[in-house]
Amino acid sequence: MPIGPSTVGSPRLGTLLQRKRKYLVIISLDLASINRFNGDTQYCSLPSFDRTNVQDLNGLDSLKKLVLAKRPSAAHVSSFTVTCALVWVCFAKSAASSGKAAVDDDVEYFTFVADCRARLNPPLPPTYFGNCVALVIKAKLNHGELKGNDGILVAAESIGQAIQKSVFNEKGILHDAHNWLAQFEETAGKKTFAVGGSPRFDIYDVDYGWGRPKKFEGLFIDDSGAISLCKSREADGSLEIGLSGTKIYIDSFATAIIEFLGNLLP
């Protein structure tokens, strides 16, 4: 969204930018602390103690079929939708064991951005180089719903509805751009998860002359409550999820996702 003099002068935007500057400083300090202690296990409370990738997520088609069988009216049941739903649910299920316990009535948000380049009217030309994204903050559920037996179903339904109403809205993807800041402020102080990337991002196929990347780590996920998402280097059709947190947090999430998929899929 272009920012001109009129929007820069907005008090609401000014507050948002101040928060962002402070946030960047916090992330920088955290990363410096990790480097100084060399990842020593006695400092496992550091917010970015470890990073890991959950690779080769088999069964995405089975997850989509499950959601559609149980929720036939669900909108936009895609690989992105069910992957995000899976991660969101496993975050909720692992919250207690990772020290991030929440009460069942707590509202949680899942946020993401959508590519606007081909969705504008008229669309941007193929030669356009740069970002053009829309903010989507409309997926929200109670903690109890997420960790319940139907968590994957309600999460996929909520995320799919958010995509349908925002990205594929008949009024256009920018129809409610004037409300984005208000929607963003609604999540202040609330438990919010975000995703950066897409199952379509083939990062490991990029070669600038040094060969293909060995491992991708998005710095934007450090201490931000976000995950990264891209195609996996290891196998066609699989995805790679990157997340950041304390060792306890990472181990709890890994256990939750393995157990959940083992119980859910044949």
Image: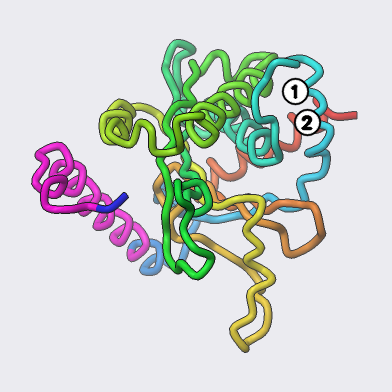
Q: Residue at x 40, y 62 (%)?
A: 34
The x and y percentages for residue 186 are 30, 26
Q: Residue furthest right?
A: 266
Relative to the observer, which residue lies in front, 55 or 136?
Answer: 136
Q: Quadrant of residue 204?
A: bottom right
Quarter the C terminus occupies: top right
Number of numbered markers: 2
The boundaries of the magenta stretch are: 3-32
The x and y percentages for residue 184 are 31, 33
Residue marked by disc 2: 63
User: Colour mode?
Assistant: rainbow
Q: Categorize mark 1 by other alpha carbons within 10 Å: few (<14), some (14-19), many (20+).
A: many
Give the number of the disc on residue 218. none
Q: Residue at x 45, y 26 (%)?
A: 138
In this rendering, is residue 103 above or below 224? above
SS for dot 1: helix
Give the number of the disc on residue 67. 1
Relative to the observer, which residue lies in front, 237 or 50?
Answer: 237
Q: Tell me, yes or no, whether the highlighted magenta stretch contains residue 6.
A: yes
Taking the image as drawn, is residue 263 in sight? no
Q: Residue at x 42, y 54 (%)?
A: 132
